[in-house]
């Protein structure tokens, strides 16, 4: 409460009442501060207190820049040239007010073609896109069935929908079917193509087949497959006969595409519905022209350098081979053919200690702690990139072996 506001109160209320109001406010404020401090202290005691860090001079084995596009000078130049032609620094409002443009609409048409969909709708982030889909479409009498390892934005969106929520065991299609059998109303099955903490792929063809059997609608989050897999970066391979069974796909551009933003793809009806009902679309300022241009340029760049997909596959293959040769007796990891490689180090302290030792050896690697992952499944998460040399990958494995 500002001093000005307190003076205004004192102008209209007797001094004794104003004084009481200030005392009550200060008491309440102190109570909240103590509660926040207590909860932070608990985090600290549990060894899972988060903090912001900046690091430099280390070999990047942590970022989601799988194809190296965020550091591409060639892509940056292309974006800069295109952006110099615009006359606006910002969108100045939501898409429904002043934020829409031909640039936006042309880019969405291009995305729909690249991502092989009837339509595409750009969002400010993958979090906003998933929130939009799951809060706006499922209704109170419907059911959302989601993988237990789904990202927080999927769970948050589902909570806002007021629909019934059921989680199924990770990548377990039998448990998925059991949960679908308990569902009511319209059924929405939500999965991620690649899971961000494990790096493993969902059994999408089996999931689509089960969903078709029960007339369920499938939503796929392609956050960690966008760019890395598929023709021109359109995600994981899906049986063409089953593609028509997909209700919506969410693509994120802040990871392998090296820029920012996201898109929901699906039918034209879905796009129109989201424009009219998705609050995270309606009530947020649109991305600035620079971001929309970046999306267009990034996909153009990938189309011209599609060999990056094979390069990152080779890096993953090398890491897996070296892990088998040198680390299997000492470490366990989750099977993954994706740049995300998770080495399990149960216990927050164990994960922190190993990560700190790797940082001292020159590698930017972070621990993934509970509650981000379940207790007992803490890990260090190694992300491979096209710009990581074979020698860097080999030396990382040798360092891990020496730290066993």
Image: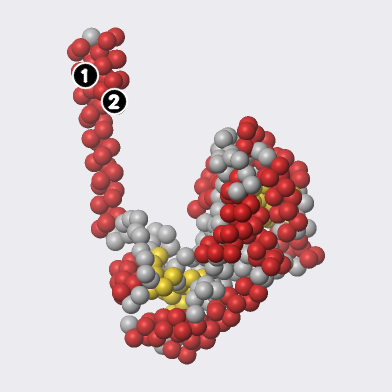
Residue on which disc 1 sits? 20
Q: Secondary structure at mark 2?
A: loop
Residue for point 42% across, 59% down: 372
The x and y percentages for residue 224 are 57, 63
Single out the residue that lies furthest toward the right: 241
In the rendered image, is residue 350 in sight?
A: no
The x and y percentages for residue 247 are 71, 53
Above or below, 163 against 42 in this view is: above
Residue on which disc 2 sits? 2
The residue carrying pointer 1 sits among few (fewer than 14), some (14 to 19) or many (20 or more) residues within 10 Å by Cα, namely few
What distance separates the C-alpha of mark 1 from that of mark 2? 16 Å
Location of residue 32 by image quarter: top left
Q: Nearer the viewer, mark 1 or mark 2?
A: 2
Residue for point 39% across, 59% down: 371
In the rendered image, is residue 314 in sight?
A: yes
- Left or right, 163 with reference to 114: left
Q: Nearer the viewer, residue 273 or 396?
A: 396
- Left or right, 176 with reference to 106: left
Above or below, 9 against 389 in this view is: above
The x and y percentages for residue 94 are 60, 36
The residue carrying pointer 2 sits among few (fewer than 14), some (14 to 19) or many (20 or more) residues within 10 Å by Cα, namely few
Q: Secondary structure at mark 1?
A: helix
Viewport quadrant of the C terminus = bottom left
First in sequence: mark 1 or mark 2?
A: 2
Badge number at residue 343: none
Location of residue 353 by image quarter: bottom left
The x and y percentages for residue 56 are 37, 66
Q: Nearer the viewer, residue 136 or 279?
A: 279
Single out the residue that lies furthest toward the bottom: 325
Residue for point 29% across, 26% down: 1
Q: Nearer the viewer, residue 76 or 91?
A: 76
């Amino acid at each position: 409460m500002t001093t000005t506001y307190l003076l205004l109160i004192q102008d209209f209320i007797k001094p004794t009442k104003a004084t009481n109001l200030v005392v009550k406010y200060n008491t309440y404020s102190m109570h909240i501060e103590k509660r926040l401090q207590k909860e932070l202290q608990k985090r600290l005691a549990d060894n899972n207190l988060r903090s912001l860090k900046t690091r430099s001079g280390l070999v990047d084995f942590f970022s989601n820049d799988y194809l190296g596009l965020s550091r591409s000078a060639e892509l940056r130049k292309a974006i800069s040239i295109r952006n110099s032609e615009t006359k606006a620094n910002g969108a100045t409002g939501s898409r429904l007010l002043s934020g829409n443009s031909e640039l936006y609409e042309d880019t969405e048409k291009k995305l729909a073609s690249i991502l092989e969909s009837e339509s595409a709708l750009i969002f400010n982030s993958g979090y906003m896109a998933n929130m939009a889909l799951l809060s706006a479409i499922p209704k109170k009498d419907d059911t959302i069935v989601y993988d237990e390892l789904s990202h927080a934005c999927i769970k948050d969106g589902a909570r806002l929908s007021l629909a019934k929520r059921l989680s199924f065991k990770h990548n377990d299609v039998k448990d998925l079917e059991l949960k679908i059998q308990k569902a009511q109303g319209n059924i929405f099955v939500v999965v991620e193509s690649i899971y961000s903490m494990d790096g493993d792929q969902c059994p999408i063809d089996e999931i689509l087949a089960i969903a078709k059997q029960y007339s369920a609608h499938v939503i796929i989050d392609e956050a960690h497959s966008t760019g890395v897999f598929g023709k021109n970066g359109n995600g994981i391979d899906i049986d063409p006969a089953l593609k028509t069974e997909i209700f919506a796909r969410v693509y994120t551009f802040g990871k392998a595409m090296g820029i920012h933003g996201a898109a929901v793809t699906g039918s034209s009806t879905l796009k129109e519905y989201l424009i009219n009902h998705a609050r995270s679309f309606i009530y947020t300022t649109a991305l600035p022209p620079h971001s929309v241009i970046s999306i267009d340029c990034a996909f153009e760049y990938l189309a011209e350098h599609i060999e990056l997909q094979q390069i990152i596959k080779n890096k993953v293959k090398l890491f897996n081979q070296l892990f088998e040769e040198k680390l299997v007796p000492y470490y366990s990891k989750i099977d993954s053919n994706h740049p995300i490689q998770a080495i399990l180090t149960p216990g927050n302290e164990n994960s922190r200690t190993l990560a700190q030792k790797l940082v001292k050896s020159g590698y930017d690697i972070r621990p993934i702690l509970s509650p981000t992952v379940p207790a007992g499944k803490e890990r260090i998460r190694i992300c491979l990139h096209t710009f990581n040399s074979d020698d860097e990958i080999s030396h990382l494995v040798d360092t891990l072996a020496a730290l066993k």
